[in-house]
Amino acid sequence: MATIYTHIESNNWKTFFLIVLFIFLVVGLGWLFAYWLNEPLILIIAIFIAVFQTFTGFFWSDKIILSLTRAQPLKKEDSPSIYNLVENLCLTAGLPMPKIYILPEKQPNAFATGRDKNHASIALTQGLIEKLNRTELEGVIAHELSHIGNKDILLQSIVVVLVSLIILLSHFFLRISFFRPIGRRGRGESGGIIFFLIFLAGIIAAILAPLAASLLKAAISRKREFLADATAALLTRYPEGLAGALEKISLDPEPMRYAREATFHLYIKNPLPKDKVNWFAKLFATHPPIEERIKRLRMML
């Protein structure tokens, strides 16, 4: 039977697997670039980018994410009630105090980021603080602290950086392909056919790479949200607090101004309004249906 500890071990393996897979994707695209442009240096650059970006993702992904979302640090004197709420939950969970950030968003939402419990941050939107009562806010904060304790945050944060880079490389390859004459390497009929097949494979790879990147993002199992919900309920001893918060969050019509597709999976709830989540997007959803999450929490009462 799966436990929190097996989930943590699983996240460690998933992180390793995603990093290795990412390196192969970037190097593979780099090889196609090098072959197509007849520039071996491009492959060396691609390998360097893969290693550098992985290193960056491990150590600075949280700073990149916080910058993308326009997060501002919250000091204790700015909001003693929020600070004390986080501090009390950290004491209960046995976690170090994370840095607290506020997002200038009206939609109630939140996420946690960082590489480990000693280098973690939680971000709360202004709308979350204004629209939720204390027990609901406590449930959401406990959920985000659970992601820290369960070691979900490194996996989530690295994926943001990796997905963005793969999509960027794919767009670059597609654009430059239109400006390079086919057959530059081809000398003779057989060489021309082989080169054309390589070129075609490159185009297909560049088109499918964003899809593969989305699958990487979706590889973060939906179970992590269910587990974080359950851990939060145990932490607060009041499942209805988080259930009520999820209900309010799901019904709120406010859009998110600074959320990007690469960061959607970080939030406690997908920032897109429900009516904009089409059937295709649901195939790659990293969050389980919020109704199911609420149902499970209320079954714990």
Image: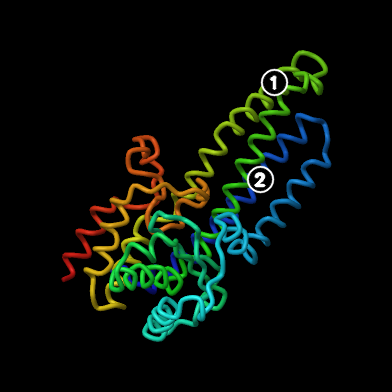
Q: Residue at x 69, y 52 (%)?
A: 50
Q: How is the image coloured?
A: rainbow
Q: Position of residue 256 (x, y in %)?
A: 45, 49
Q: Is residue 154 above or below residue 99?
A: above
Q: Is residue 88 above or below residue 246?
A: below
Q: Residue at x 49, y 48 (%)?
A: 257
Q: Residue at x 50, y 50 (%)?
A: 259
Task: Work out which quarter of the rendered image holds the C terminus and state it.
Answer: bottom left
Tell me the crowding category of disc 1: few under 14, some 14 to 19, or many 20 or more residues within 10 angstroms, Cα based: some
* Residue to which mark 2 is pinned: 26
Amino acid carrying label 1: it is Phe
Tell me the crowding category of disc 2: few under 14, some 14 to 19, or many 20 or more residues within 10 angstroms, Cα based: many
Quadrant in the rendering for residue 38 = top right
Task: Work out which quarter of the rendered image holds the N terminus and state it.
Answer: bottom left
Number of callouts:
2
Taking depth in this image into account, of 246 and 288 the one nearest to the observer is 246
Quadrant in the rendering for residue 269 = bottom left
In the image, taking residue 84 as reference, residue 189 lies left or right, namely: right
Amino acid carrying label 2: it is Val
Taking depth in this image into account, of 236 and 292 the one nearest to the observer is 236
Secondary element under disc 1, as helix, strand or loop, is: helix
Quadrant in the rendering for residue 8 = bottom left
* Residue to which mark 1 is pinned: 196
